[in-house]
């Protein structure tokens, strides 16, 4: 134990004097967490609280296009501004000058086409009501080819998922205009008078509201925010980033003269590796404490939602411990196989990013398909992230994350075994 | 298990080849180094001196033959032998980020010393080697000579019976060389066997009693310095060296 304790002291001293290593392990991940959470939070705010600026150029003179613009405005997602007819060719310039992310050009015959479509649908309905099936068939044959397309311009910075949301919102506004016109035409055909406003509203407005409720394992209903998503994810990334210091440290020791001396002393090098594991496991736990503390106490001061710790703090500690052990084991493994510090740092950094990608830190693993989804099971970060999400987002307890901890444990043991083989092969133990 | 014998190092029919090299470094090498002696290993660059020292200390493992260090198999499973010898490699073999006292604490513990033994030996060695004033300063800021002294101090922290030194005075000033050589003499008087290599042949003449010259993995001569000089009719070790190994450059 004395040898181990002295070795740990030695590793801590070297670590504390490695300013670059400390900044890579602590300062950089903290900056990363703050920046990514801020960006994610601003995206969240943009979509949910702020409005997306949209420029509409209405080249139509009918009522339907005006109703469409009103419907788009009522969605609540967009801040609508209009440019005069005749400027449709300059909409791209206007989008850039007005900082709008979206632009719509309503075609000149929009209202006429909506009316024609409504009339056609109405005629079919009337024929069907009166049992004139032949007339219905004839009407279908004579049906107009549909309404000409709206042109929607978008800024390429908009992510695909957001573009699909926008497209869906505008399609619903379009649908509302068409349905309203069809209803009015149908009512007029049947009653030869205007559709009463109250009836129109009753028929068009949905009375069914949607209650969005997050599902949790403990029954609590804390709405997830950018901090709950990002802080755990990037804490894992930070833990694995110890490779930049630890991997290099193993290589440095291996290629420096000190290793030759260590081999001639009556102590197994495994004591040295155990010391590094204990020291850097402490580092990973400290990283988690620092980053979580920033999420809890600093985030509210800089306008970010505060991080809410899970109820089961013991489970959080166990997950963090196993995750840290896995990160440290991986770093030592890379250090044992790398020939130079440059190899350890280069391979280490890139492999961490790859493991983060396939592990679901960049793209959620539930959105992955096929091979990517299978590969994600081999990334230790995937199991760390699933465990953290279960605790932070779903209110899970220790029993809910045992599966993740078990998988992480198996991966860690495999990494340790590979390290052992590497040490044996290189005659280091 | 150690057996009573009079040799500090005994090498019998030893062969060794680096895995990446086609040619062996040593073939059927035999060498005996008596206990308590000051023994010098000399040879041109690439002759195999450092490889032989690494084999003696168990850093490398021989392919064939036997290397016994005080009766124990070098590099064998019995780690007890590692307590009996000290190694001072040519490269600075310590943690540059740490101070001399911190390095001695770590290597002392790994050499099997207790906390008290480490403290006593640290005070003693830092005093003898003139490192008292800088005991708590990071070694990376030291001069080459100071680093050499730290390197030596670590090698002898556990009072080894056999001390293997690979060019312990390379790149140091006259004062440091004098201090190191004086200390090595003192160790030898106290019973430590010294196995030493250097390119400073005048220094070697002062320090060593017996020598072996190696070239291309073979021992080309061995014995007491005075006997060898008489036998080959030379006045200095340098003349003998040039005569035996030639004037051609070595890589």
Image: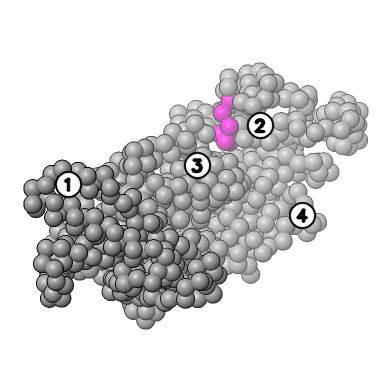
> Residue A181 — which label?
none
- Number of residues whose C-alpha sits closer than 10 Å to that of mark 4, classed few (under 14), some (14–19) or many (20 or more): some
Q: Report how far apart the C-alphas of labels 1 and 2 lie in the structure.
A: 106 Å
Between residue A405 and residue B229, name the one nearer to us. A405
Q: What's the mark number on residue A336?
A: 3
Extreme-left residue of the structure: A130
Q: In this view, does A343 lie to the left or right of B202?
A: left
Residue A19 spot, x, y in % from top left = 55, 65
Q: Which residue is disc 1 drawn over?
A: A135
In the rendered image, residue A280 lying in the magenta stretch gets the answer no
Does B123 sit left or right of A397 as displayed? right
Task: Give the residues in magenta.
Answer: B56-62
Question: In the figure, A360 relative to B136: above or below?
Answer: above
Residue at which label 4 appears:
B172
Labels 1 and 2 touching (C-beta < 8 A)? no
Nearest to viewer (mark 1 / mark 3): 1
Residue A285 in view: no
Disc 4: which chain? B
Residue beneath label 2, please?
B52
How far apart are the alpha carbons under marks 4 and 1? 111 Å
Q: Where is residue A54 in the image (x, y as percent from the top left)?
A: 41, 71
Q: In this view, does A321 lie to the left or right of B228?
A: left
| Real-space CA distance between mark 4 and mark 3, rounded to the nearest whole angstrom | 34 Å
Dot 2 or dot 4: first in sequence order is: 2
């Amino acid at each position: 134990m004395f040898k181990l304790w002295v070795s740990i002291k030695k590793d801590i001293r070297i670590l504390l004097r490695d300013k670059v290593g400390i900044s890579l392990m602590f300062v950089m991940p903290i900056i990363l967490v703050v920046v990514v959470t801020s960006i994610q939070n601003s995206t969240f705010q943009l979509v949910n609280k702020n409005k997306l600026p949209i420029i509409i150029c209405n080249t139509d003179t009918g009522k339907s296009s005006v109703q469409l613009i009103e419907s788009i405005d009522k969605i609540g997602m967009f801040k609508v501004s209009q440019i005069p007819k005749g400027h449709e060719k300059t909409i791209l310039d206007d989008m850039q000058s007005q900082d709008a992310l979206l632009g719509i050009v309503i075609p000149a015959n929009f209202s006429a086409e909506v009316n024609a479509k409504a009339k056609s649908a109405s005629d079919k309905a009337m024929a069907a009501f009166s049992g004139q099936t032949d007339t219905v068939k004839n009407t279908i044959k004579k049906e107009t080819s549909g309404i000409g397309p709206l042109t929607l311009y978008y800024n390429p910075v908009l992510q695909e998922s957001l573009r699909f949301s926008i497209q869906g919102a505008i399609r619903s506004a379009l649908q509302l205009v068409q349905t309203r016109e069809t209803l009015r035409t149908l009512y007029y055909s049947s009653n030869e008078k205007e559709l009463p406003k109250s009836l129109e509203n009753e028929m068009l407005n949905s009375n069914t509201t949607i209650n969005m409720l997050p599902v949790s394992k403990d029954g609590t209903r804390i709405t997830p925010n950018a901090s709950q998503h990002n802080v755990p994810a990037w804490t894992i990334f930070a833990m694995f980033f110890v490779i930049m210091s630890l991997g290099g440290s193993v290589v440095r020791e291996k290629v420096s003269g000190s290793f030759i001396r260590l081999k001639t002393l009556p102590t197994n090098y495994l004591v040295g590796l155990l010391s590094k594991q204990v020291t850097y496991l402490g580092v990973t736990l400290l990283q988690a404490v620092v980053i979580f503390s920033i999420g809890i106490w600093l985030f509210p001061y800089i306008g970010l939602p505060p991080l809410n710790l899970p109820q089961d703090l013991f489970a959080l500690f166990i997950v963090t411990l196993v995750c840290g052990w896995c990160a440290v084991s991986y770093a030592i493994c890379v250090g044992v196989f790398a020939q130079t510090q440059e190899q350890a740092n280069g391979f280490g950094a890139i492999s961490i990013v790859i493991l983060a990608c396939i592990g679901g830190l960049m793209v959620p693993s539930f959105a992955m398909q096929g091979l990517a989804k299978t590969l994600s099971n081999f990334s230790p970060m995937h199991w760390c992230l699933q465990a953290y999400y279960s605790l932070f987002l779903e209110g899970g307890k220790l029993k809910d994350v045992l599966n993740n901890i078990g998988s992480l444990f198996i991966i860690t043991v495999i990494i340790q075994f590979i390290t052992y083989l590497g040490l044996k092969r290189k005659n280091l133990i | 298990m150690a057996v009573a014998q009079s040799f500090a190092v005994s090498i019998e029919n030893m062969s060794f080849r680096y895995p990446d090299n086609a040619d062996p470094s040593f073939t059927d090498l035999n060498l005996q180094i008596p206990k308590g002696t000051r023994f010098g290993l000399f040879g041109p660059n690439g002759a195999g001196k450092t490889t032989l020292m690494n084999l003696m200390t168990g850093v490398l493992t021989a392919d064939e033959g036997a290397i016994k260090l005080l009766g124990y198999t070098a590099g064998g499973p019995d780690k007890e032998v590692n307590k009996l010898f000290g190694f001072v490699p040519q490269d600075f073999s310590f943690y540059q980020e740490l101070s001399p006292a911190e390095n001695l604490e770590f290597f002392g513990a790994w050499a099997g010393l207790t906390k008290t033994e480490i403290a006593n030996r640290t005070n003693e060695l830092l005093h003898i080697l003139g490192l008292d004033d800088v005991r708590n300063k990071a070694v990376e800021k030291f001069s080459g000579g100071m680093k050499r002294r730290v390197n030596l101090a670590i090698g002898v922290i556990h009072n080894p019976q056999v001390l293997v030194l690979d060019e312990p005075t390379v790149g140091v000033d006259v004062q440091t060389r004098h201090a190191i050589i004086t200390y090595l003499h003192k160790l030898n008087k106290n019973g430590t066997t010294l196995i030493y290599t250097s390119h400073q042949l005048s220094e070697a003449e002062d320090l060593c009693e017996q020598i072996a010259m190696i070239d291309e993995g073979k021992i080309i001569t061995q014995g007491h310095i005075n006997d060898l000089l008489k036998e080959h009719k030379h006045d200095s070790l340098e003349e003998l060296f040039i005569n035996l190994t030639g004037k051609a450059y070595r890589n």
